[in-house]
């Protein structure tokens, strides 16, 4: 088993406060190796980045954060090609290290020497490894699997010399509309909410925005939503997101009070895994239910879809087992003629490819926190996502960001 590369990585990775480089490798966008029939994996090197938000901190009904965790891996092949994949976290170093430990200690030995071209077989080898399946068909092992799987797709698209959306089969939608979430945090005052919403619409050209809800008294949320609706006018699509805080009676009272606000969807109104309550709310409310960012498997999505508990399906490659399982979910949604609107756990660096490609997608979240740390950042013009042009999955980080924001994997 060749473990030299990540053993070296462990030795060289130092906490930033020791004044030395935090990562041992510099990302490369060299595509001179494209076209090989075989891609032998020679190194699997996990990394942790803690990237600051564009605001000092933000909160929704459940979370408060100052940084976004980009916890992932570089996978290197014998001909020198590099693939990058990552999951998204709240930048908590202790739990982030559980993910990198899983990549380093559990998945890397299963990958070294394998042919990265054989994507489907490798996904099954990792996801259905009996020992790993025993300890986690969700959670840490699945987040680690997501990072590895995305890195393998990045490798394959780079080998082909194509952006992922083209490698998968080409664009099926004329445009992918962006909705701006970064103006609607629950921690914002009503005036900040109004200023941000107006700026997004009038200056930046967004026609879709999303606002967080979830105050202890839902009437506070109704007042904030009413003010924003008056400020942006009737043509703007306003979605809302409860992040799973409220119970069913609270949601029922809320949707009755919000009836005249033309809410585009109500995202995660209830506890993430509660199929029955979401189905009950969907039956009782004219506001479509959106969910999926906390679901780990295609089986979980199937439960919600078959129960009629979701209208807008929101898979996330960083929580599902990567792109491979995302495709299963998107295809399932398509079979039910349900729209797919991915959750931006990777801040849309990968989902922009998948949304241009998959025929169930036409709406994608926009949060600009980490885009400028990548070789090819996402681009939104007048509320429309532009198609990426460079080979790969959009996951190659900038060397400077790796050096500045890298953390020791322990
Ligand atoms: Mg959400």
Image (spheres, rainbow, N blue to C red):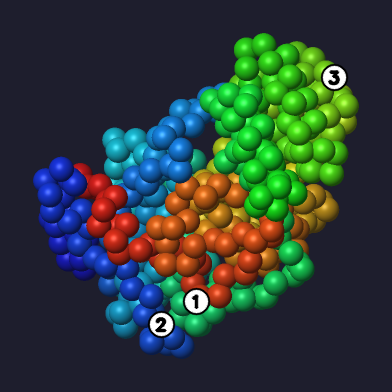
**Looking at the image, which is closer to me, 107 or 252?**
252
**Which quarter of the figure is the N terminus placed in?**
bottom left
What label sits on residue 137 in the rendered view? none
Q: Which residue is mark 1?
A: 391
Instruction: Tell me which label, 3 or 2, sits earlier in the chain.
Output: 2
Which x, y percent locates residue 181?
61, 41
Which x, y percent locates residue 188?
56, 27
Disc 3 is placed on an element classified as helix
Structural distance between the alpha carbons of marks 1 and 3: 48 Å
Which x, y percent locates residue 53?
43, 42
Q: Is 371 situated left or right of 335 in this image? A: left
Few, some or many residues within 10 Å of mark 1 (<14, 14–19, 20+):
many
Structural distance between the alpha carbons of marks 3 and 2: 55 Å
Residue pictured at 83% horizontal, 29% vertical: 261
Looking at the image, residue 234 lies above or below residue 38: above
**Looking at the image, which is closer to me, 56 or 300?**
56
Mark 2 and mark 1 residues within 8 Å of each other at the beta carbon:
yes
**Which quarter of the figure is the C terminus placed in?**
top left
Quadrant of the image occupied by residue 155: bottom left
Q: Which residue is mark 3?
A: 256
Disc 2 is placed on an element classified as loop
Quadrant of the image occupied by residue 241: top right
Residue pictured at 65% horizontal, 43% vertical: 199
């Amino acid at each position: 088993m060749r473990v030299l590369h990540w053993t070296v990585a462990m030795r060289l990775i130092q906490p930033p406060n020791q004044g030395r480089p935090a990562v041992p490798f510099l990302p490369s966008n060299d595509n001179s190796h494209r076209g090989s029939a075989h891609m032998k994996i020679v190194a699997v090197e996990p990394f942790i980045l803690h990237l600051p938000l564009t605001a000092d901190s933000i909160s929704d009904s459940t979370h408060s954060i100052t940084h976004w965790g980009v916890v992932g891996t570089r996978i290197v092949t014998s001909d020198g090609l590099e693939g990058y994949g990552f999951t998204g976290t709240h930048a908590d170093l202790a739990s982030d290290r559980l993910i990198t430990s899983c990549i380093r200690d559990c998945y890397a030995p299963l990958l070294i020497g394998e042919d990265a071209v054989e994507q489907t077989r490798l996904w099954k080898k990792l996801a259905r490894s009996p020992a790993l399946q025993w300890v986690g068909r969700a959670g840490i092992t699945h987040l680690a699997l997501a990072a590895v799987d995305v890195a393998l797709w990045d490798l394959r698209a780079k080998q082909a010399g194509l952006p992922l959306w083209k490698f998968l089969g080409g664009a099926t939608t004329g445009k992918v509309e962006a909705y701006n979430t970064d103006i609607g945090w629950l921690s914002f005052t009503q005036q900040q909410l109004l200023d941000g919403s107006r700026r997004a619409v009038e200056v930046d050209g967004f026609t879709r925005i999303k606002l967080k809800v979830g105050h202890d008294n839902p009437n506070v949320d109704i007042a904030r939503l009413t003010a924003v609706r008056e400020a942006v006018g009737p043509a703007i699509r306003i979605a809302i997101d409860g992040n799973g805080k409220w119970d069913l009676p609270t949601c029922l009272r809320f949707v009755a009070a919000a009836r005249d606000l033309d809410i585009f969807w109500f995202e995660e109104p209830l506890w993430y895994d509660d199929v029955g309550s979401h189905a009950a709310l969907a039956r009782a409310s004219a506001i479509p239910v959106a969910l999926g960012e906390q679901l780990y498997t295609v089986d979980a999505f199937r439960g919600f879809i078959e129960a009629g508990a979701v209208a807008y399906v929101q898979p996330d490659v960083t929580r599902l087992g990567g792109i491979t399982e995302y495709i299963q979910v998107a295809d399932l949604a398509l079979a039910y003629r349900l729209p797919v609107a991915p959750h931006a756990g990777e801040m849309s660096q990968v989902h922009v490819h998948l949304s241009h490609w998959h025929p169930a997608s036409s709406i994608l979240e926009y949060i600009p926190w980490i885009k400028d740390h990548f070789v090819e950042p996402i681009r939104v013009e007048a509320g429309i996502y532009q198609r990426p042009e460079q080979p790969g999955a959009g996951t190659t980080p900038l060397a400077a960001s790796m050096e500045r924001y890298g953390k020791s994997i322990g």
